[in-house]
C-alpha cells in the first residue's frame, strides 16, 4: 500500500518528467519475493515495460513479498492486490484497473 507522502513524491516526479496531471498515474508494484520470482514475476515486469508505451501513466516498482505467496504471482495496482497474474492476463488487469 502506498502512503500519501509516497504518492505525492511520485506525482511530483511524474510531473517533472511528463505532462501527466496529478492523479492520472497508475502505480504498479510487482512482487519480487522468492515464490513470485520463481513463478516468473520478471516476465510480468518485461511485459509491463512493453505496455508503458501504450499506458504512459504506469509507474512500475518492485515489491517485497505481499504475504500471498500461494496465490502468486501477485501485483498491486493503485493499492489493490491482484493474484494469479501472468504475462498473458496483465494487460487485461491493467485495463480493468483503469476503470
Ligand atoms: S513471494 Fe509474492 S506474495 Fe509472497
Image (spheres, helix red, strand yellow):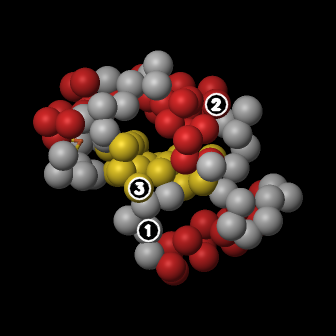
Which residue reaches farthest bottom? 5
Residue at point 47% right, 19% down?
A: 88
Q: How many marks?
A: 3
Q: Position of residue 12 (x, y in %)?
A: 69, 71
Badge 3 crowding class, 10 Å Cα cut-off, few under 14, some 14 to 19, many 20 or more, is few
**Vertical placement of residue 51 versus 66, above or below:** above
**Vertical placement of residue 92 versus 87, above or below:** below
Q: Is residue 47 left or right of residue 2?
A: right
Residue highlighted by disc 3:
80
* Snapshot quadrant of residue 72: top left
Note whether residue 16 is visible. no
Badge 1 crowding class, 10 Å Cα cut-off, few under 14, some 14 to 19, many 20 or more, is few
Mark 3 → mark 1, Cα distance in angstroms? 10 Å
Residue highlighted by disc 2:
51
Residue at point 31% right, 39% down?
A: 83
Residue highlighted by disc 1:
2
Mark 3 → mark 2, Cα distance in angstroms? 19 Å
Note whether residue 61 is visible. yes
Q: Are marks 2 and 1 in contact (CB under 8 Å)?
A: no
Q: Are marks 3 and 1 in contact (CB under 8 Å)?
A: no
Amino acid at each position: 500500500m502506498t502512503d500519501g507522502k509516497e504518492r505525492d513524491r511520485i506525482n511530483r516526479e511524474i510531473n517533472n518528467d511528463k505532462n501527466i496531471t496529478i492523479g492520472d498515474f497508475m502505480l504498479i508494484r510487482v512482487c519480487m519475493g522468492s515464490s513470485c520470482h520463481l513463478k516468473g514475476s520478471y516476465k510480468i515486469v518485461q511485459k509491463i515495460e512493453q505496455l508503458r508505451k501504450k499506458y504512459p501513466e504506469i509507474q512500475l516498482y518492485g515489491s517485497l513479498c505481499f504475504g500471498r505467496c500461494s496465490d502468486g504471482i501477485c501485483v498491486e495496482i493503485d493499492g489493490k492486490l491482484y493474484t494469479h497474474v501472468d504475462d498473458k492476463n496483465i494487460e487485461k488487469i491493467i485495463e480493468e484497473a483503469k476503470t
